[in-house]
Amino acid sequence: MNRRSTFGYHGVPRWVYAVAAVGGMLVVLPLVAMVAKVNWPQFIPLITSEPSLAALGLSLRTSAASTLLCVVLGVPLALVLARGEFPGQRLLRAFVLLPLVLPPVVGGIALLYTFGRQGLLGKSLEVAGIQIAFSTTAVILAQTFVALPFLVVSLEGALRSAGNRYEAVAATLGARPTTVLRRVTLPLVLPGLASGAVLSFARSLGEFGATLTFAGSLEGVTRTLPLEIYLQRETDPDAAVALSLVLVAVAVAVVGLSYGRRRGSAASGGQA
Amino acid sequence: MNRRSTFGYHGVPRWVYAVAAVGGMLVVLPLVAMVAKVNWPQFIPLITSEPSLAALGLSLRTSAASTLLCVVLGVPLALVLARGEFPGQRLLRAFVLLPLVLPPVVGGIALLYTFGRQGLLGKSLEVAGIQIAFSTTAVILAQTFVALPFLVVSLEGALRSAGNRYEAVAATLGARPTTVLRRVTLPLVLPGLASGAVLSFARSLGEFGATLTFAGSLEGVTRTLPLEIYLQRETDPDAAVALSLVLVAVAVAVVGLSYGRRRGSAASGGQA
Amino acid sequence: MSFELQASLHARNFDMSLSLADGETVAILGPNGAGKSTLLGVISGLLRPDSGSARIADKQLFNLDDGTRLWKAPHLRGTALLAQEALLFPHLNALDNVAFGPRSAGASKVAARETAQHWLAEVDAMPLANRKPSQLSGGQAQRVAVARALAAEPELLLLDEPMAALDIHAAPLLRRVLKRVLKDRKAIIVTHDVLDAYMLADRVIVVEKGRIVEEGPTRDVLERPRSHFAAGLAGLNLVTGTLTEEGITTPDGRVFAGQHDSGWSPSPGQAGVAAFPPSSVSVFLGDVHGSPRNSFPVTITDLEPHGDQIRVRAAGGSAQALSADITPAASADLGLVPGMDVRFVVKSALVAVYPA
Amino acid sequence: MSFELQASLHARNFDMSLSLADGETVAILGPNGAGKSTLLGVISGLLRPDSGSARIADKQLFNLDDGTRLWKAPHLRGTALLAQEALLFPHLNALDNVAFGPRSAGASKVAARETAQHWLAEVDAMPLANRKPSQLSGGQAQRVAVARALAAEPELLLLDEPMAALDIHAAPLLRRVLKRVLKDRKAIIVTHDVLDAYMLADRVIVVEKGRIVEEGPTRDVLERPRSHFAAGLAGLNLVTGTLTEEGITTPDGRVFAGQHDSGWSPSPGQAGVAAFPPSSVSVFLGDVHGSPRNSFPVTITDLEPHGDQIRVRAAGGSAQALSADITPAASADLGLVPGMDVRFVVKSALVAVYPA
Amino acid sequence: ASGAPEPSNGSATGQLSGTVTVFAAASLKSTFTQLAKDFEAKNPGTKVTLSFAGSSDLVTQITQGAPADVFASADTKSMTKLAEAKLVDGTATDFATNVLEIAVPPSNPASISSFADLAKPEVKVVTCASQVPCGTATDTVEKATGIPLSPVSEESSVTDVLGKVTSGEADAGLVYVTDVKGAGDKVKGIPFPESDKAVNTYPIATVGTGKNKELAAAFIAAVTGEAGKKVLSDAGFGTP
Ligand SMILES: Nc1ncnc2c1ncn2[C@@H]1O[C@H](COP(=O)(O)OP(=O)(O)OP(=O)(O)O)[C@@H](O)[C@H]1O
Ligand SMILES: Nc1ncnc2c1ncn2[C@@H]1O[C@H](COP(=O)(O)OP(=O)(O)OP(=O)(O)O)[C@@H](O)[C@H]1O
Ligand SMILES: [Mg+2]
Ligand SMILES: [Mg+2]
């Protein structure tokens, strides 16, 4: 109870708002410009054309799958990074964050060298009859590769700021580490996990370079919405812009929701 | 003093480490695979060829410039988002985060529609004698566009977890908001700002799609390292892999340093 | 009057008005959540009430009445705030922390440092000048924070439980420092400790549930408390009722005989209280007939050591909690245990009766 | 012996060994940073010492000596920890918080809830069962936390200043609950409040700078303190020196006459202490010649109200702080102010002298 | 997970079925989409799956195991690379040619009318980088005409060149005739005679690792057949 701040002081100097407005413009204006360029009368037919719908459907399915994979792999990674102590932790963190800053095309090349037919694992996988490259699996893998850092970073932050005091108490009450994880840690960082998952989903949705290189561009199999946009640009820039707008809309909705939800629950879970 | 936890409980179940290892592999293996593919005897000549060096130099210069721009615009944005309260705040946050999840090519198109010769602002700029397209300025703008969210997200998180108690005290001591910002807020969140800046730098360094679409690709002017890699891939995949590795090395170094430094200062500034 | 405030904030069920004379120090006492910190927040400008106004001398701090929306920002108010945690800026050493206020007011670096040194010396913290906050103990940090607040030359100093986080050794030192620096200064100190009120304050204000329930000179309030909270702090039993010539009558018809102030008599039906120290209460088993006229059946709820005495806590029929202090020997003789029904007997000569 | 521990942790300059009998409750007293929380951390397994061992009955908690590296994880120790903050899981209601321990031990949901209800009732918190922690007051939360710790059926209960964050109204209620539940339970309670030690503990241990400086039955330690910290808590003046037939001689050659225990005489050169309450000290101006044999020149450092007395704090020549309680009238007559040189006179009949 | 590799149960009469996966250069997108639709219509029970990317990307993908049956390249170099990797069945067939054309925004702000106009210093011209096929062609033309260009950008694909022109960013760009045609009224094409110094040839071939060789051969036949030629020339391609 004592932790709660009695005050809500906000002393942001006024000129900061002015500069922030410039910064905001830098991001918002391009989107406005894009909206202005959309060929509205053709908008609906464009985005409901068969290839567009196939691409959107594929994008949603693969993004959902890769988000799941991100949660499954990212939660342990974030836990290990936030709570564990082991040699090479700093290096692991740098590596996990790498896909954030790697040009996706390079990421795609690297994935190809790993899971491709002549890749590090690919050879053994091929012997086992598993082909990953250029399948929907490859799309999911590429998306997971680029989206994983978003989940790990969000969740590690949430874990660190939640601290380990509740976990320590739970342990002295007799809870095994797995029980602590399930009944204390995860419920406490749920908002952070949710927003991490949502960001991962959005990033998966927008993934382009690594998918193109690693998964190819086959309608219904590997041609996700961003690839469809890229291809449309070859022949019909209008269609590309219209489709981009769909992507932007989904992304804004998803990111907006995520951050909205996070702040809401932060307020009610204030005791933490 | 009471805030400091007396305990260092780390109750991570062992199986979590196993799953985390799988997750870590997903990221580390592709890099290993890439390293394995490098044509080592030719490595040095490849990366020291004239176009490669030109591209690397340009990348470093533009990334430094865009990082500066990110700091100048991103600090106010983060402040406004973390401390301010105004209608549309949630929407602004969603928009600022958008470049994180937008396919960069789409971002490039949007920038073109804004700052291009026939764009929203471009027309007025052209009248004023300012030409952005095909210039190094365009590269910097594209990089700033994609890198800004990294700075804003890092810093907003740091600002929120630092809380506003020190700021409130400073205000009652007679410090104007600008003084509070300069002498209290910024020094307190310096680690967050530093790691945000470093992430921005790394993201700028890796930026490809938006630059290609918006700025073009001319050696020494707009062809940054990722563009050079993309181009090399057409003719000489070995060279592309070697250059990618340079990029990866720079990114790992930069991210590793950033997070290392952040944790170090978090420990020493524990009282906050 | 030098400082005046009237403010209400519905979201926190807060509505108080108070004023301070020049050089006066007021202690605010009250249970958790009573609105003490909220009051300081409103004064310092960190919290905006729904309505009300405040001023220091001629300077209006805020005025949200009569359609005006005057709201001075915290840094223009001259009301430095010192809270339970010192909140020293962790990136500055003690000296620069103290110099922060003068620097913010526009003093040069050198001048600000000089002022800071003066104030550090004032709180006996000169040797700490070059230490970072992380190298200070709680008590040291709190003294530096006092110096920092004073160096800002506030017209009104606000202290929110400044000693609550300190141990029994550090607290007296800070109290001594505060006693010195608050002497001729307008200050409001929130505290849970009656010692602070005695030593530091000219006047105390008792708040409960966002309202002022009692106020007056420290001694008056603590020696003749009118609220249960103040009586608890002063270690007195308090019984409320209606004043009579003899003493007071409680709502359930029980009569408490006691001493009125000499030369004063109540108007009929006037509300009053009877206050008496636990040491004036004797404990008996069974019925008694003796000179003390005040005798009540109660049930023991608790026995606690209290210095070299045993404090017997009990609940009376009117559900009012009373305590008695008796010797351990007497307690053992009577075989007292919680849950036992006994009789509390108070000599009426030791009961003070006065209007509520 | 039912619980035994010996541990040292160099990084915190910590080295203690202690043991608890079955059903015994021990209070740990000591200044900030003395290592009290560190001790509980080592016992509960949240903090790993460099060396040492501990066991509860036959169960070894850890053994880092003799090349063995036995280290039981916290959840296998049966040592529930309750700290200053209740730390109720914010996403569970009170009932589920209490049911957490039984659930973790493998009980079914229904069985765990039943156990939880039992313990909630035990701490008078049944009506709060369905509230979320954010809807509880500090005292309520702390009571639920006690129930939660007990529901885990710990073999050893660790309490780290469980009442420090509560106000004067909530603390007695919790103290009463603790008194009941700690009765026949092994428990270690860290506290800053001598009342807790009196009411809850069979034995107290005083720690300073990571070491145990004094231990013994509560009354013995607090009535005949040997450390300055314990004397401060008990409100006694303490002077250390060498025992003589008459009393003790301080290192600077001053003689304190006092009463030895009857039938006991010191061996020459044995270290000892003289303890006496502030109320046994009188204050005089100038030289005195009277029956009391203990008379010292001191300088007044402070005057504080203390109940209905004035407590005069002063520093003696041997730099030992002493206090005297006198009436306000006497204080006014003598015109005492801080900085004044006066004489403290103690009747030797009121000075207890015993070995250190 | 790729197109179902049902064995074609085609008899001698050539009853075709199953799925054929065609990897085609990005510049063939609209024509091959049309050709695939026609092919499916003519051969019920068959399905043509198309994958478009830059020719050299496609080569990399196929060598890395992408499930292609047919590869249609925008230059002979890529096809040679695939052949060197022993992934081409038999020999490749050239099925179309393409030549460069100047693309300008519809308003033609720099008033370009000839290749020589591109060399004017105030003209912002965008070309392909020499690493990609269209860039190689540009180099050839430059050499043949003796007019060196100083482009403001050397893009890595025709699409990027076209993008700069359609957005009005560049005054002119060197792209293929087919790109100009495909862009409709968003750009204006200005043919120049020197373009025939650099004729780009499009070869097509069955991929060695392909699963449905019969169907692949049938699709190639359809592309090189009369109907195919019509679709291609409608789009501006020349015949080899
Ligand atoms: N940030 C907040 N938002 C909403 N209500 C709050 C907030 N902080 C405090 N309150 C409420 O306002 C009322 C007054 O709180 P305040 O902090 O002023 O009490 P206090 O007297 O300072 O208590 P304490 O002795 O615990 O410090 C309480 O009912 C509390 O629940
Ligand atoms: N996380 C930590 N890392 C390093 N040293 C610590 C840490 N926490 C406490 N210490 C140090 O260990 C010593 C003992 O601290 P501990 O918290 O056990 O004291 P304590 O007796 O509980 O004090 P308090 O009364 O303030 O709670 C102190 O010197 C303290 O500075
Ligand atoms: Mg408060
Ligand atoms: Mg402690």
Image (cartoon, coloured by chain):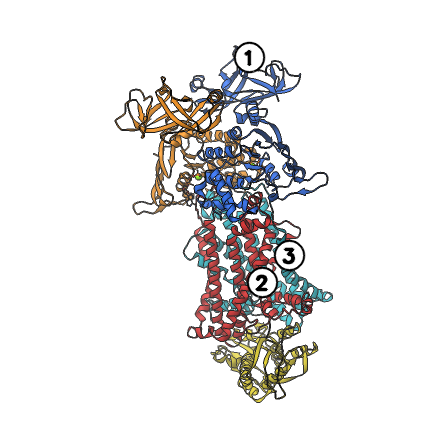
Chain colours: A red, B cyan, C orange, D blue, E yellow
Can you identify the residue that label 1 sits on?
D293
In the picture of the structure, the residue carrying the numbered disc 2 is: A144
The answer to whether residue A26 shows anywhere in this view is: no
Residue A112, horizontal then vertical, whole percent: 64, 68
Q: Nearer the viewer, residue A228 or E123?
A: A228
In contact (CB < 8 Å): disc 3 and disc 1 = no
Labels 3, 1: one chain? no
- Does the beta carbon of the residue at mark 3 sit less than 8 Å from ligand 2? no
Please identify, in this view, whether the residue under mark 3 or under mark 1 is nearer the observer.
3
Q: Secondary structure at mark 1?
A: loop
Spatial separation of the CA atoms under disc 1 and disc 2: 87 Å
Q: Nearer the viewer, residue D302 or A83?
A: A83
User: Residue D178 vs residue C17: left or right?
Assistant: right
Splitting the image into 4 quarters, where does residue C259 fall?
Answer: top left
Callout 2 amino acid = Thr
**Closest to the observer, D196 or D168:** D196
Q: What's the distance in space between the residues labelled 2 and 3, CA to CA?
A: 15 Å
Mark 3 lies on residue: B21
